Amino acid sequence: MARATIIFILITAFLQIFSQKLYITGYAGYGIGVQKDYYNFSDLNYYATPDTSYSHYMRKLVKESFGTGYRFGGSLGTKISGNISFEMGMEYFKSKPVEFVSTARFTYDYSSTYYVRITDTYLVTGKMIQLSPSLVFEKEFKNIKPFLKLGGIIGFIYMEEDYNGYLTNTIPEYSNVERMQSIFKYKRNTSFGYLIAGGCNYKLMKDFYVFLEARYNNIAYVPEEAEYTKFIENGHNTLSTLSTSERYYEYVDEYYDTGKDNPSSKTSNLKSRYSFGSLSLLVGLRLDLF
């Protein structure tokens, strides 16, 4: 409902400032992620010999941006006055998957032959549908139109974490290999940001241009809810056996940890911020309608 309201207000505003000059654009491009944030993940390497008091842990913060990837979009613009136009853009973006790997290895004093090794691999992908109301300042010189664009971003974002875990056990009386797979989805949320862009239109023929644009996007995603949508253990679908606390998560500003698990309630974690900021190069076409 909130997203529909935002879109309605933006379309209404566009129609209110509609004038005699109208144009449309379409483009494709690639962005490099900037403004990296710490992903809520611990890169863990664990070595232990259970028959002694020795153990070793290593924890590492992982800093990543989800702004790297291909983007496709278009816009509808109208001349306000002189060299100033109002433009409403829409874009689809899917981030390049970000990989995180954790490993664990357990060895035993009574035989150097036997060990347990665990490898966990996470592939995290973000997706965004972006609306961008902007002001465009341009100046025409014969066949070229350089421009500067300043605008806001309304992003409808969600993320997905694809997990594969392998356990290798060389102890004879145990299973040699175990595997677990899951998909963990952070639910869609509305985020706000801004963009700054500059570029140039080159006239190919009357009212038809090709353009090159460099764009900086500043936007981040803070999920509020997430859930497992796939949970497979050794080839068996066990999603329906998960309790509410195992399957559903909520992200809050603060919570009280009593040390007791309530299977009928969602698991609470603190909110985290994930950057979708990017520096992109876009190539597109523009058609002046009338």
Image (cartoon, helix red, strand yellow):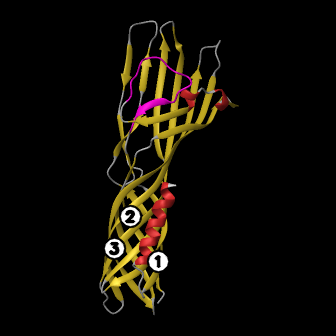
- Which label belongs to residue 37? none
Query: First in sequence: mark 2 or mark 1?
Result: 1
Identify which residue, 60 or 236, lies in the foreground. Answer: 236
x%, y% of residue 157? 47, 52
Q: CA distance from mark 2 to mark 3?
A: 19 Å
Q: CA distance from mark 2 to mark 1?
A: 17 Å
Side of 243 relative to 272 (left or right): right
Label 1, secondary structure: give it.
strand
- What's the residue type where badge 1 is placed? Thr
Relative height, residue 224 to residue 239 (above, below): below
Q: Total label count?
A: 3
Kind of residue indicated by mark 2: Ser
Q: Does 270 appear in magenta?
A: yes
Q: Quadrant of residue 202?
A: bottom left
* Residue carrying label 2: 280
Residue 157 visible at all: yes
Which residue shows up at 42% across the image and 50% down it? 66
Q: Residue at x 41, y 18 (%)?
A: 258
Q: Which residues are magenta?
A: 255-271
Q: Earlier in the sequence, mark 2 or mark 3?
A: 3
Specify the label residue 25 is tagged with.
1
Residue 110 lies, in percent from the top left, at 51, 6
Quick check: 120 left or right of 138? right
Instruction: Determine the main secondary structure of the stretch shown in magenta.
Output: loop
State the residue lying farthest toward the right: 236
Q: Which mark is residue 135?
A: 3
Does the stretch in magenta take in 261?
A: yes
Identify the element where label 2 is drawn: strand
Cα distance, mark 3 to mark 1? 15 Å
